[in-house]
Amino acid sequence: FKKVSLATILSYNPEIFLLDEPTLGLSPKSRKEFIELIKNLKGTKIIATHNIEMAKEISERIIVLEEGNILKTY
């Protein structure tokens, strides 16, 4: 379902992608495939996730928020 949703979004050729917990509920194999797909997207990616390791794999810059305040940046 997530791959189909992403394919639909890609058909609009967006410049910005907003993703909320993009790998939640995926099998390890699907998770790996989806991460590779996200990594190869051209454009700005804003991802809300609790999975810092996945965020590090995908992102050039990470901002950790706590109650709306910047706690840490990578």
Image (spheres, rainbow, N blue to C red):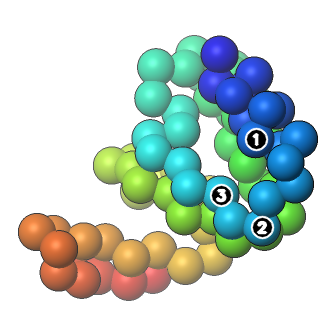
Bin the neighbour count of mark 3 within 10 Å (Cα to Cα): few under 14, some 14-19, many 20 and up: some
Q: Give the residue at x 33% y 49%.
A: 50
Label 2 packing within 10 angstroms: few (<14), some (14-19), many (20+): few
Circle 2 SS class: loop
Q: Is residue 55 visible?
A: no
Pointer 1: what residue?
A: 9
Q: Earlier in the sequence, mark 2 or mark 1?
A: 1
Picture residue at 50% right of the left edge, 57% below the top: 47
Q: CA distance from mark 3 to mark 2?
A: 7 Å
| Numbered label attached to residue 15 | 2
* Label 3: element kind: strand
Decide which of tag 1 and tag 3 comes sooner along the chain: 1
Mark 2 vs mark 1, CA separation in Å: 11 Å
Quadrant for residue 71, please give it: bottom left
Q: Amino acid at mark 3?
A: Phe
Label 1: element kind: helix
The reply to whether the C-beta atoms of the residues labelled 1 and 3 are less than 8 Å apart is yes
- Is 27 or 43 nearer to us in this picture? 43
Quadrant showing the N terminus: top right
Q: Is residue 17 visible?
A: yes
Query: What is the three-letter code of the residue carrying label 1?
Result: Ile
Q: Which quadrant holds residue 37? A: top right
Task: Tell me what residue is drawn at x 45 percent, y 45 percent.
Answer: 20
> Which residue bears the numbered disc 3?
17
Quadrant location of the C terminus? Answer: bottom left
Pick the front one: 53 or 1? 1
Asked if 36 appears above or below 32 in the picture, the reply is below
CB contact under 8 Å: marks 2 and 1: no
Residue 17: x, y in percent? 65, 57
Cα distance between the residues tagged 1 and 3: 9 Å
Left or right of residue 19: residue 37: right
Identify residue type, mark 2. Glu
